[in-house]
Amino acid sequence: MSALGDAEAARRGKTGGLSLSAAAPWLIAIVLLAGLPFVFTGGAALTVMNQMAITIIFALAYNMLLGQGGMLSFGHAVYMGLGGFFCVHLMNMVEYDGLLLPLPLLPLFGGLFGLLFAFIIGSFSTRRAGTVFAMISLGVGELIASLSIIVVAFFGGEEGVSGDRTMGPVVAGFDFASQKEVYYLTAAWLFVSALAMFLYSRTPVGRIANAVRDNEERAEFLGYSQRYVRWISFCASGFFAGIAGGLFAINFEILTEENLNLATSGSILLITFLGGVGFFLGPVIGAVVFTLLQTVLSLYTEIWALYVGLLFVLTVMFFPSGLAGVFAIHVRPWQLGKIGLLASPYLKMFVPALLFVFSAAAVLEILFHARHAAIGEEQMSLFGLTFNSHGVWPLTIAIIICVASYLILKRLAPSLKEAWDEANHGEVGR
Amino acid sequence: MSGAAIELKALRKNFGLAQIIRGVDLAIAGGERHAIIGPNGAGKSTLFNLITGKYHPTSGSVHLNGTDVSRLKPHEINRMGLSRSFQITNIFPKMSVFENIRCGLLYTMGYKYSFWHLVDRQPKLTERAEEILEQINLSDRRNLLAGVLTYAEQRALEIGITIAGGADIVMLDEPTAGMSASETDYIVDLIRQVTDGKTLVIVEHDMGVVFNLADRISVLVYGEIIESDTPENVRASQKVQEAYLGAAEEADH
């Protein structure tokens, strides 16, 4: 947790009682979750939001390991995937064997299944932290992913398993055939899971997970077995990952090997890191940004994954505390009442920065088009312009704009630095 | 010697062929302030780590209030009422000062592995943590990250974490290492105050601290205890002078 979060929490502990400032973010979340479908009404938008919600739960669960417990897992897709597969089978049992399980409860069983496997695998993988844990997680991830082709009865081989969510008992008039109903179901689970994970981080075992992360030897000498602490965190994380899996099953009605493999495990690590592991909200931001890039950006460009990769590398290099960290460093100037000092340099840099980003993207797009378009297809359109990608000028112009905007940014940088130092100078009154 | 808080019987520890602890017999009575001194490389830290369960003895045994703890893990030994600090500052740097102390309290106040309590909603826990902060004079540092405290404050915090659990036996490994004279005085006062009525075992290089604080002193040289007596007798002991100063001279060459 951030220093700020801790201090805030500590202050609250002193006063006790449920304060409005503590409840406010959650009330805003409720309003936001309830209101979004009225703003983004399309079916595609609902699908994107559902995917976002699922990714948020998964990323928050993953951060219970990485951010709060200090455990780097390369195979966490396994627990979400297993929860999802189990839920598809449950859906099929509802459809064919008359199992009376209302759909809204399904993710809970996905969670319990994820918990079960986290319990089993965690029993040996959490003995040690660090590289040992990371390597075991990698091995187990590969193992389960390859099992999916071997244990066909459960994993359905290469085509996976599919089901139909609408076959269950109708709950209060909802059969969950429409996207909107599924959205509200997913949003409700998102809210409950996020709140539960937040509260978990405020329990003794959640706090001691931080302690073990920071200094496992010290924690041992406070009476805690570092292994049990890691194991418990791992189980909790597996539970919430399984819930995400259950929601995935409800949304997409199909699970395949892809839900278990290393690529999925890798992307959740990327998402969590992109958002910022040190903040509770970090994975939320990461999941939202990543899902948007994945679904919206991919409509416009084939090389969206390249941009995501670049964003990731730049974030890790320049903002190791993630996108949430970018917000967090503005808290101090805000508290000092000096945030206004930053407005002018930011505004000055905005246009060159925009030009830089778009011209750099143009260079990449032109090169990509020139190399990959079908023979004879030399016209390309970009940012509303149509031109010949094989010509010299478009590329030259793009490069010139890119270099020029970079130089302008470089010239403006010292004034930003100055404003930044000034804005952070002073004592925050308590 | 069944009344001993800590009793070591024919304790030995080898690392490969190197014999680091070579047969130590020692009894430390409850409520005693006991210092272990000796030249560099005498095995003081190893002895410490054997008592606290970080290492297991090659042979011989460690008894805590009469119970054999030679094969127990650190957290199990801690639960029997022994707490320790470290030679290198060992706190939770990314957590607030208050949070550091609170972590030291959680287990002994019965929260253990609970995930059904909210730590901020436990008035007794908060109150106790505040008391300890008061005791170690860090109340005004409460909400700072432990990692940004000064060195002396971090050492004080570590002592706070160590005593937080209410252990009867407190073991401190070079608590004044790297401190200025005034910081040392401050920490020694603090130690005396917070370990009142407890058994204290301390490893220390600063002879001023040792003779000031200890009821009894054991001198460890090359893995053996050559003298274990009151400060006056240790100071007067011919054996200690020869061995300790001899070894120190040897180390100087």
Image (tube, rainbow, N blue to C red):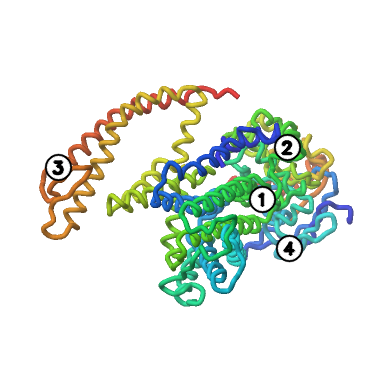
| Disc 2 versus disc 4: nearer the observer | 2
| Mark number, residue A238 | none
Could you tell me if the residues under marks 2 and 3 are in contact, i.e. CB atoms within 8 Å? Answer: no
Left-right relation of B37 to A177: right
Residue at the spot of label 1? A205
- The disc labelled 2 sits on which kind of residue? Thr
Same-chain status of marks 3 and 1? yes
Which secondary structure lies at badge 4?
A: loop
Mark 2 or mark 4: whose residue is earlier in sequence: 4
For marks 4 and 3, give the CA distance: 73 Å
- The disc labelled 4 sits on which kind of residue? Arg
Q: Position of residue B171 (x, y in %)?
A: 74, 46
Left-right relation of B78 to A259: right
Q: Is residue A333 above or below residue A369?
A: above
For marks 1 and 2, give the CA distance: 16 Å
Q: Is residue B149 above or below residue A259?
A: above
Q: Residue at x 65, y 40 (%)?
A: B99
- The disc labelled 3 sits on which kind of residue? Thr
Which secondary structure lies at badge 1?
A: helix
| Disc 4 versus disc 1: nearer the observer | 1
